[in-house]
Amino acid sequence: MRKYTRTHEVGKVAVSQPALTSGSGIVVIEPQFRPEHGHADAVTLLDPHGRLAPDAASVMDDAEVGAALRLMLFGRVFDRKAFSLQRQGRFGTYSPIEGQEASVVGAAFALDPGRDWIVPQYRELPALLRHGLPLTRYLLYHFGHPLGGHIPEGVNVLPTQISLAAQLPHAVGLAWGLHQQGRDGVVCAFVGDGATSEGDFHEACNLAGVVNAPVIFFVQNNGWAISTPRERQSAASSLAVRAVGYGFPGAVVDGNDLLAVHAVVSGAVDRARAGGGPTLVESVTYRIGPHNTSDDPSRYADTEALEDWRNRDPIVRVQRYLEARGKWDEAAAERVRAEIDAEINAALEEAWQVSPAGNEALFDHVFLADTPRLADQRRTWAKEH
Amino acid sequence: MPTMTMIEAIRHTLRGELDRDERVMVLGQDVGRLGGVFRATDGLQSEFGADRVVDMPLAEAVIVGSAIGLAVSGMVPVAEVQFLGFTHQAFHQIGAQLARYRFRSKGRFPMPVTIRAPFGGGVRTPELHSEALEAQFVQSPGLKIVLPSNPADAKGLLTTAVRDPDPVLFLEPLRGYRLVRGEVPQGEHSVAFGEARMAREGTDVTLVAWSAAVQVAEKAAEKLDADGVSASVLDLRTLVPLDAEALCRAVAATGRCVVVHEAPLSGGFGAEVVATIQEGCFYSLESPVARVTAPDAPYPIGALEEHYIPGVEQVVTAARRTVEAIA
């Protein structure tokens, strides 16, 4: 029996062999895997001025980049609207996307809504819209209307997840099931840096590797889990390096660079579709706003870092890129903003027209058919509530 | 009708369902090559392949959580958690995810998922293998909770579970796996949920139980019979849905009742049974309803378990006291 102990020298493991204690019984073993091996520079294609890196080419054509920009702007405009409605008491708790628009939209544009699935967390509205979720459903969810939970048939999106990382085992099962049935869909699961600390993250990644599921774990490292900074979540130098431990590739991408996110996720999608299995993508971005409408970031925000990240605004970057290509100007921006305003207002009007749910909605869909006890309660509630 | 043990009846049923519907998958720890630690899935992987009878990593949460995703994709997963005590490590995926999925998606994503898990004491397992946790799951609406006590019901109820459009927690009596034998109908045999079974007819007192406690109640009824006390035994079979009608009918018929379960007293499903009785047939009662349960203490290490789980003698004593009590 050998006894393993740590010496004072960091990174070196001493093995003391009781049988050899009289002589030179200490053997020093160098670890074969070192923490510094986990570092990688983020993939970037567009610099903060919107200039394409030398030798790089965009996979997205200008029309696609324009559509993506519109969706990014949608996210920014919707944030403002949602905050204003929430302050008026007309909207529930809302988590803004500001700063993460390229990350969310770049990933979404790498997917095919006709066959691929999005497994969201709760900060990915533009991706859900691009995948076909009607905005009114999303609004109803935030009005607290049960119809908001209903994703129309044919829209390949799973419900919003509040219990963080719990969606990841679902994503793996879904991807695995599609693969088993010979369907060529790929699943993209969104998760944050904080939720990578959850056991479900580990269990899901581990199973995905074992069954070679066509799934992408898209980790949006926005620097914060409410007030807890990234470095309090993990001592690992990157989150993507964990992929190695699960037996599949990982990648770190500049999450404020639409073209880079799109390229990296597209690569992961192609790989998964071809039977290559899972990929862990860490999209390094920054949460510019509060965690949600109830949060007070003045208690913890790092103002210097915030300023630095504001200068790397993902929307400005794409606007400059398209401007240089003669595909965007102030007039286009104004026109698009006006269209987005009108779209949001129309959806709000529609959502406000939906009749409020009655207490029968407490019982609908608990099971396919009420149990006798539930049927009794349904009758009692109808009479007495 | 052939005679089978519980474990044979379960294996026979899983085989039938895998054969009937190619969407059915069996997944769990050691269910494939080994055929399950109790051999519930023996031979199924060689017959149906490693894609349909799947050895899973040792991780309960992802066994349940991936079953949710498999169901979304169109599969019908039958997941095994090796021991009910280990569902603590999957509780969030069962209660907060699986049970709520149909409800929160307004029916878009039904969950035809069965989770099988053995439980119950008396076989000297290591710690955390024996706990009777059924009541914990009753507080997770959206989940059906099924506990067969004999091989015929194991087949009938498991068949219904696999075909049910909603999630089912199917809890198997560990002690009864090989001890309990009985006739099992061949071919199609299903038992509807929410129908309690009168295991024995009697006139003086009604013993209410489920799972392995049914055998304890039956033995107690035999002893009581020798003393001139006629006991009926009602096997609830499913806690959700609960057959409150049959329960109240059976209790009203004798006016006296003892509830028996292996879980601790406080907050056990026996409390729900007693509350249901007093709401449904209070005026038929001749004496207070008694409970014979485990104490409010953690499940002990092996040599103490006979003191912990309800035994025949305690049920007999409680029944006598109930019968002798004057209203």
Image: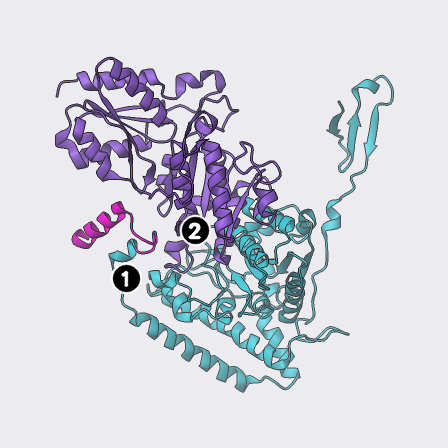
Most extreme residue toward the right is A23
* Distance from Cα at disc 1 to Cα at disc 2: 27 Å
User: Magenta span has A14?
Assistant: no
Q: Is the same chain shared between marks 1 and 2?
A: no
Measured from the top left, where is residue A69 in percent x and y?
A: 56, 76
Q: Secondary structure at mark 1?
A: loop
| B304 horizontally vs A188: left or right | left
Q: Chain of mark 2?
A: B
Question: What colour do you see for chain B?
Answer: purple
The kind of residue tagged 2 is: Pro
State the cyan chain: A
Q: Is residue A198 above or below residue B30?
A: below
Looking at the rendered structure, which numbered label has been put on residue A357? 1
Q: Secondary structure at mark 2?
A: loop
| A115 horizontally vs A90: left or right | right
Q: Is residue A253 above or below residue A232?
A: below
Quadrant of the rendering where the N terminus of chain B is positioned? top left
Magenta residue span: A364-385
The structure residue drawn at horizontal position 77% and vertical position 74%, both measured from the top left corner, is A55
Residue B55 seen anywhere in this rendered image of the structure: no
Return the residue nearer the eye: A331 or A248: A248
Measured from the top left, where is residue B234 in percent x and y?
A: 28, 30
Label 2 belongs to which residue? Answer: B112
Measured from the top left, where is residue B141 in percent x and y?
A: 35, 46
